Image (cartoon, rainbow, N blue to C red):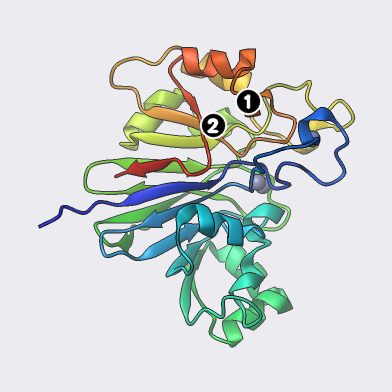
Amino acid sequence: MIEMSINVTVLGIAQDGGRPQLGCKKSCCHEVKDEAYPAGIGIIDDNGNRHMVDASRTMVHQMEIWNQDMLDSLFITHAHLGHVDGLGLLGKEVLATNEVPLYVSSTMGDLIEKTPSWKFLVDEKNVVLNQFQEGDQIPIGGGCIVPFSAPHRSELSDMHGFIIRGENKSLLYLPDLDDWPSLLLGFELKEWLKSLRVDIALIDGTFWSGEELPHRNLEQIPHPFVEDTLQLLGVKQDGDPDIGFIHLNHTNPLYDQHSQEAKLVNENGWFIAQQGMTFLL
Ligand SMILES: [Zn+2]
Ligand SMILES: [Zn+2]
Ligand SMILES: [Zn+2]
């Protein structure tokens, strides 16, 4: 018998706007050869069922990366643009899914009920709403998916990251976060991940530093800066989880593998998520 395991594929590594980003005239978005799609992962479980986390408008390209053409369930982290702007693709105009379970928090579920174009997907039975609570163990073949709440500006909905647990390993997906202290509540980042038995973590790498968007007030779009997260992580030690950065803003120097910043991430033993990267759990 062939031993199966849960397979997780990175389907997008960009912040919600993608890269190139609309309206950007700077070098970061000029003649970009490899488009970066909004953050998302695809999970194939032991039974061959296909679960997607976050629904981007670029789903057609993400499915290509994933080598799939349909999904069996969908999980949503929160209501910001790049995480939900592909929801409509499940409707009759495109995929025409049939009763695909849609896993959302209760505030995200309320928003779906209140948003006519999303409510329509429920009424037409393209999706079936499943509201989760933090800590629920949502079963998938050979493991489960566990939502956890994370502080992130909540104008529209709250925010949940997910831990995908397989028979051998667990992967944490946390594309958006306001700041580490409000999440960790006194824990050190690596200790927190270890306490959750996480082996691989894909974490918010939106901005390298506060200097990326000189014309925007970053207090209105808070994220932990990668350069600060690196300080928290230090150098990777034996027994530390594998930690990668995802959800990169178009301005982030980590897009350039040869940048000083990318070298620093790698030299410290961490990684920058790449589209198509896979993890066996
Ligand atoms: Zn986002
Ligand atoms: Zn740009
Ligand atoms: Zn967000």
Observer-nearest of 151 and 66: 66
Seen at 39% across and 16% down, the residue is 236
Q: Quadrant of the N terminus?
A: bottom left
Q: Is residue 26 visible?
A: yes
Counting from the top left corner in percent of width and height, residue 141 is at 27, 62
Q: CA distance from mark 1 to mark 2?
A: 9 Å
Element type at marker 2? strand
SS label for mark 1: helix
Residue under label 1, please give it: 254
* Left or right of residue 145: residue 141: left
Report the amino acid beneath label 2. Answer: Phe
Where is residue 279 drawn, in percent x and y?
36, 42
Reading the image, the residue beneath label 2 is: 245
Residue occupying the point 48% across, 82% down: 98
Q: Is mark 2 within 8 Å of ligand 1?
A: no
At a point 48% along the width and 44% down the height, the residue shown is 276
Location of residue 96 with respect to 216 vertically, above or below: below
Q: Residues within 10 Å of mark 1 (few under 14, many from 20)?
A: many
Residue occupying image coordinates x 44% and y 22% = 188
Q: Are marks 1 and 2 in contact (CB under 8 Å)?
A: yes
